[in-house]
Image: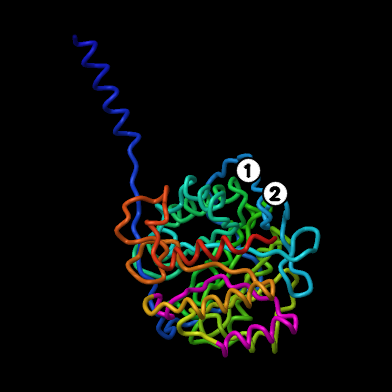
Amino acid sequence: MKKLLSILLALSLLAGALGGCGGSDVQKSTAPESTGAAPEATASAPEVTESAPEVTESAPKVYDDGRARPSSCGRLQVKDGKLCGEDGQPVMLRGVSTNGLIASESFINETLFEELSRDAGVNLFRLAMYTYGVGIIGYCTNGSRERYHEDLAKGIEYAKKQDMYVIVDWHILKDGDPNTYVDKAKVFFAEMAETYKNYNNVLYEICNEPNGVDWADVKRYAEEVIPVIREKDPKAVIIVGNPDWSKDLRSVAADPLNFDNILYTLHFYSASHGQEYRDMTEKLSREGLPIFVTEYGVTAASGDHPRDLESADKWIELLEQENISYCMWSFSKVAEASAAIRSTVPKYSGFVREDYTETGLWLLDTLAKHKTR
């Protein structure tokens, strides 16, 4: 009897040790003007002081669905103003973004990545890592860097295994001026580039939405961070934000960066940014400016109501026409109109159409329409 009780006790302890926990979502907030002062920049790449978590190699699946995939298009490059595969032919990435990395970490699970890739046709997943915040939210403001690196490693590996590309996003917002944490950015991207230099599915977004600064400030930041990545990974595709929450492409076009394999961010929310912005995008794209929509919404710029699906359809038509890749904000269940999953749904994978919001259903239908490479 005692032996039986001992066995039962051991099994109970083992079950407890294997238990896990999940995260929750936070809302996207409207960014105020930056109040942080930019520190003095240094010219040399920083010494890497923190090691990235160990990453386990795994054999990726192959999805032969006609879309651009790492298995068929390999490492990407920028050629003649367009994002292209290894063969130099244009590609389209169509994907979704987290609503903050830590706050949405329950969505970073292999089952969901498989569903999105296999069933929804997602070939891009954006890992949005806030740099500024309180507690665990901000990587540069007392957040758990170890936890951030663990979530990034999981997301990159799941994307690789499910034949998707992935964006590592240095998600500045409330900090406004990317130079505020330029030294931390250089250390972070040195670690990322060293760890993933042999991966063919990783792209780097080095400043999400600069605001309260001009292009000269952002360009100065980029000219420090890009060489840090290039030292480790000379051919990495790097995406650079711009002023006015990444809508000031005119300033970029007038004074572009002098690097290869660079794309410039454009963000829009269809209920706030209409024909004027579409006209600007079309003009600059046709003039050869390499553009990547790393974040868009079918709502107002606040991330909430109203939705404008008619305007969103016009945006997608333009982006498809111009071979501009795009990534929707956000694959989350935040209680706002931009979220793809209803806030009352208790799970983080195994989604059916009834689990999606009107935004999410529009996303599924839009992805289903566009199957080209």
Instruction: Choose between 42 and 165: the one closer to the eye.
Output: 165
Residue tagged 1: 60
What kind of element bears circle 1?
loop
Q: Is residue 34 left or right of residue 279?
A: left
Q: Residue at x 34, y 42 (%)?
A: 20
Whole-number angstrom distance, CA of label 2 to CA of label 1: 8 Å
Tell me where residue 331 sits by quadrant. Answer: bottom left
101 to 7, vertically: above or below: below
Q: Which residues are magenta?
A: 275-303
Q: Position of residue 168 (x, y in %)?
A: 56, 61
Is 174 one of the magenta-colored residues? Answer: no
Residue tagged 2: 71
Q: Residues within 10 Å of mark 1 (few under 14, many from 20)?
A: some
Does residue 66 appear anywhere in the picture? yes
Q: Residues within 10 Å of mark 2 (few under 14, many from 20)?
A: some
The amino acid type, in three-letter code, at marker 1 is Pro
Q: Residue at x 69, y 58 (%)?
A: 232
Is the Cβ of the residue at disc 2 closer than 8 Å to that at disc 1?
yes
Q: Position of residue 72 (x, y in %)?
A: 72, 51
Q: Residue at x 55, y 80 (%)?
A: 246
The amino acid type, in three-letter code, at marker 2 is Ser
